[in-house]
Amino acid sequence: MAANNEQHIQEIRALIKKHKIWDKVFAIVGLLAMLVGVTTLIVLFANLAIDGAPRLLSWDFYTSFPSRRASSAGILSAWVGTTLVMLVTAISAVPIGVAAGIYLEEYAPKNWMTAIIEINVTNLAGVPSIVYGLLALGLFVYQFGLGQSILAAGLTLALLILPVVIVATREAIRSIPQAIREAAYAVGSTRWQVVHDHVLPYSTGGILTGVIIGLSRAIGETAPIITIGALTFIAFLPDSPFKGEFPYISFDWIMAPFTVMPIQMFSWTSRPEEEFQFNAAAAGLVLLGMTLLMNALAIYLRYRIRRNIKW
Amino acid sequence: MFQRNLFKQLALAGFVAGALGGFAPVASAADQIIKIDGSSTVYPITEAVAEEFQKSKKGAIKVTVGISGTGGGFKKFCRGEIDISDASRPILKKEMEACAQAGIKYIELPVAYEGITVVVNPQNTWAKSITVAELKKIWEPAAQGVVTKWNQVNPAWPDAPIKLFGPGADSGTFDYFTEAIVGKAKSSRGDYTASEDDNVLVQGVSRDKNGIGYFGLAYYLENQKKLRAVPVAEKEGKAPVAVSIETVKNGSYQPLSRPIFIYVSDKAYDRPEIKEFIQYYLNQAPKLVAEVKYVPLPDSAYKQATDNFNKRKLGTGFGGEAEVGVLIEELLKREGKH
């Protein structure tokens, strides 16, 4: 009996040992998998940094327009263009996307219509960006007569990130415990009050994450922007949005011609002179920096908001 | 509190977006913008001119330059979206029809020469020169899958694989090379490493001892340490000519020299800033073209082009087809076709 028991324990120990080996194996495989991503990023970053460092560290690079001489060519029109396009993208995609997400999650009746809309939204997230570019060329540039403007580009990219924002909003809203809503309804809140006072504030962190992921995708997009006709050489800035006299703000800039960072980079990489490659590398780092900055902002805001949630 | 604020901001953002949506597009007519688009080959020249021109005007006149390719440029040009089209080949029949239909006339101005350079790896010791017939043997469609070794092209060359690098089918360089070598534009074998980015071709040939490729002279001049240009003989028995600024300019590097152009829309002709820009372009071209490593036309040709522009000579000197070995002076005197 005792021997039998002993044998039994031995078997279990062997089994546990075997399982533990698999545990280790998976840990190593997982680590390697993670390293592939991280190493790629580091190597890429280092490569860009080595090539681009001299240009990256000179102030002129940020305050100069493109030029035929690599050493005096800069990214002023490109980074201003990218920033303004992103601004238009954000202020058009966020309200529409968040509203659509709230509607689908809190208001929409659960029927086949809603189901079709949901499937469509998810599918839209996977549509290649060039398709959005073609749509925008026909719709915004020609039909609406917006031309090759910052507005047309911003709206194009807004379409592109809309599904991402909607999906993120819905995920964020769904993660709020049902009890919160029920409690609010119990004290007589209307649906809008529940959304306005509880659902939206608590899900802002998640929504922001979705918005930033969307914008980070949009900032590097080249294909749709080229399709709608962004320029390569542009040595002036759009009209300033702020004016010295009444009414102090101006919207002229949204109709201005523009270029963006990825296009500027692309144009430099195809130049015969080697020095232009260094410019392209430096511009790549700046673009990477802009993305990181946006991510950092999202993390910070999320942290601020989480701290205020008390349940 | 914070969440409330953030929500208010979101609402505000929504309001602003609504305001933007209702914003009627108003083209700022006060600005004088010269819009240029088209070939990436002509781009460096136009960019240099635009840069200097804006500097000289202290920003009073704005110039924008895009890269849509020669074909894409003509599309926009014939829709009346741009004032000037950069073109690395003459306007084609299809495009002439599109322009005629839209009622857009144009002035054709050659601005520089480009020499298409045949390059090999510096370790290639055998190909001292190459004839057009040999190039045809390598690049014609019938060679696909058949001509795979150097000694198949010339028995004196080694029994080594031949690796081909060339521009993709959307490129004007490709059009001209196939026209000049094979005899029919766009007629080429397909089994070669193709890239629209000439730097990729430079890398390819410089890393492969058995590589051969062709692209614009500017890319060779920038990479002379990594590549060797092969002198090209127009016919069997004719002396091979090495590519250089000089041989392209004096017309002896044949048949791989070609003029590149800008087309000015007649609709823009009456705008003073366009006149000023074109005059500046042709005036500064000898200096700026050389600076961006292209080959300037003879001075007399720029003078003739300026004359043509001032006289508002409309139409193209070509019949809507590519032409090999055309003389620039003669071209400028031709009757304009529409």
Image: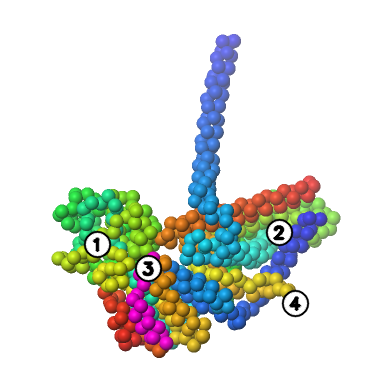
Vertical side of A16 occupied by B320: above or below: below
Q: Is residue B302 magenta?
A: yes
Residue B178 horizontal side relative to residue A249, left or right: left
| Residue underneath mark 1 | B231
Residues indicated by labels 2 and 4 sit on the same polypeptide chain: yes
The local secondary structure at tag 1 comes to: loop
- What's the amino acid at mark 3? Tyr
The chain carrying label 4 is A
- What's the amino acid at mark 4? Phe
The local secondary structure at tag 4 comes to: loop
Vertical side of B249 occupied by B205: above or below: above
Return the x and y of residue B258 as percentages of the image width and height.
Answer: 31, 72
Query: In this orientation, which residue lies closer to the viewer: A118 or B18?
Result: B18
The crowd level at tag 4 (other Cα within 10 Å; few <14, some 14-19, many 20+) is few
| Residue underneath mark 3 | B294
Residue lying farthest top? A2
Q: Which residues are magenta?
A: B293-310
Disc ID at residue A106: 2
Separation (CA) of disc 2 from disc 4:
42 Å
Residue B248 horizontal side relative to residue A92, left or right: left
The crowd level at tag 3 (other Cα within 10 Å; few <14, some 14-19, many 20+) is many
Residue B254 horizontal side relative to residue A114, left or right: left
Classify the position of the N terminus of chain B by image quarter: bottom right
